[in-house]
Amino acid sequence: MRMTKQRQTILDVLKMDKTHPDAESLYYEVRKLMPNISLGTVYRNLDFLADQGLIKRLHVSGRQMHFDGDMDDHHHFECRKCGKIIDVPLSEEPQTLSLPFDHINGRIDGFSVSFYGVCEDCSEN
Amino acid sequence: MRMTKQRQTILDVLKMDKTHPDAESLYYEVRKLMPNISLGTVYRNLDFLADQGLIKRLHVSGRQMHFDGDMDDHHHFECRKCGKIIDVPLSEEPQTLSLPFDHINGRIDGFSVSFYGVCEDCSEN
DNA sequence: TTATTTGCAAAAACTTTGCTGATAA
DNA sequence: TTATCAGCAAAGTTTTTGCAAATAA
C-alpha cells in the first residue's frame, strides 16, 4: 500500500470530520488543503480505504454513499428532516440484543444499529 | 390516494418478493404481469408507497435503493460476498439494547439493525 | 526503476422529471 | 368530470473508468 499525499490527506480530513460526509462534501474539504485534487481521486481513495478497513462506508437515506473515519464501535442517529447523522456511542453497560442468531446459517462478523427521528435543531422549527 | 392497476401490482409483487429488490429488479418482476409498465412508473410508485408508509426503503451496501414490502418489525442480514439480504425476525424474548438514548436531544421514532457476514451459500464456495 | 496512483474527461449507472394522453373515483 | 397517474424520453445526479503523465518506494 502506497501512501500518497492525496490518500493521506483524504484519510486525515475524514478522521477529523464528524459529519459523516459523502464523497463530494469531503472533496470540497480536501480541496481547501489540496486545491488540485480531483473528485475521481477522492472516490477511488474512499473505496480503497474502506476496502483496507481504515474507514467505514455508511448506508444512509440519500442517494450518496457516506463515510466515517471513526473506527471505534458506535452507532448512528439519522434525522429524517435534515439528514444529519449523529454518533451514538455504545453504552457502558453490556450490549444485550436478543435475536435468534441461530436461524442464520452463515457467520455474522458485524452489525450496526441506526436510529431514526427528528434532531433537536429540526424539532425547534 | 388513487389505486391504479400499476400501483396495486407493484405493491402486490413487492409484498410477495422476499429478496428486498431494487427498483430495476422489481421492474422486471412486474413486467411479467404487466409488460407495458415503465421503469419510471416503478420508481414513482415505490417512492409514493414508501412515503405513504406502505412499504419500507432499505439502505444497503450497493449503489441502489432497495425496498421491503414486509412491514412487520424485523431486521436484516446482508451477505458481504453476494449482497443477498435475509430477514432476521425479532426474538420472542424482550429486546434490550442498552444505549445512552438521553444523549440525543430529539425524538427517536424508529431504529433498525443490520447484521453483516457471509451467507451459507457463499461460505460453501 | 517500475508498479501504482493521479488528474482529466468521458462514460456508465441510477434516479428524477416534463409532457401528453389515459384513467380512477 | 377532473385531478391524478402512466408511458416515454430526456435530463439530472452520483459513481466509475480509460488513459497518459506523475510519483512513492
Image: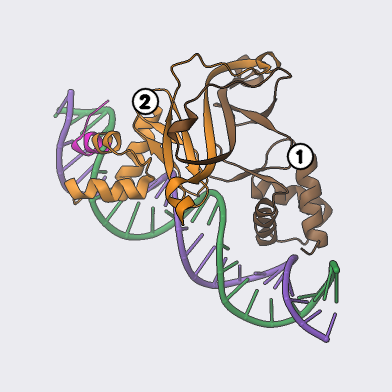
Chain colours: A orange, B brown, C green, D purple
Q: CA distance from mark 1 to mark 2?
A: 35 Å
**Which range of residues does the magenta coloring cover?**
A1-10
Q: Chain of mark 1?
A: B
Number of numbered labels in the structure image: 2
Quarter of the image where one finds residue B80: top right
Measuring from the top left, give residue A28's x and y in whole percent.
28, 51
Closer to viewer: mark 1 or mark 2:
2
- Locate residue B6, reporting x and y percent: 79, 59
Q: Residue at x 48, y 15 (%)?
A: A93
Q: Is residue B64 left or right of residue D4?
A: left
- Residues B99 and D17: in front is B99
Q: Dot 1, how many residues are within 10 Å of its Cα: few (below 14), some (14-19), or many (20+)?
A: some
Q: Chain of mark 2?
A: A
Q: Secondary structure at mark 1?
A: loop
A113 in magenta: no
Q: Main secondary structure of the magenta part?
A: helix
Q: Position of residue A114 (x, y in %)?
A: 53, 34
Are the residues flagged by discs 1 and 2 from a single subunit?
A: no
Does residue B92 show up?
A: yes
Residue A43 placement, left or right of B46: left
Which disc, if any, is residue A71? 2
Q: Amino acid at mark 1?
A: Asp
Q: Tell me the number on the disc at residue B79.
A: none
Above or below for D16 versus B33: above
Position above or below: B63 against B117: below
**Which quadrant holds residue B92?**
top right
Quadrant containing the N terminus of chain A in the rendered view: top left
Say which element carries label 2.
loop
Amino acid under disc 2: Met
Question: Residue B17's mark?
Answer: 1
A64 vs B3, nearest the viewer: B3
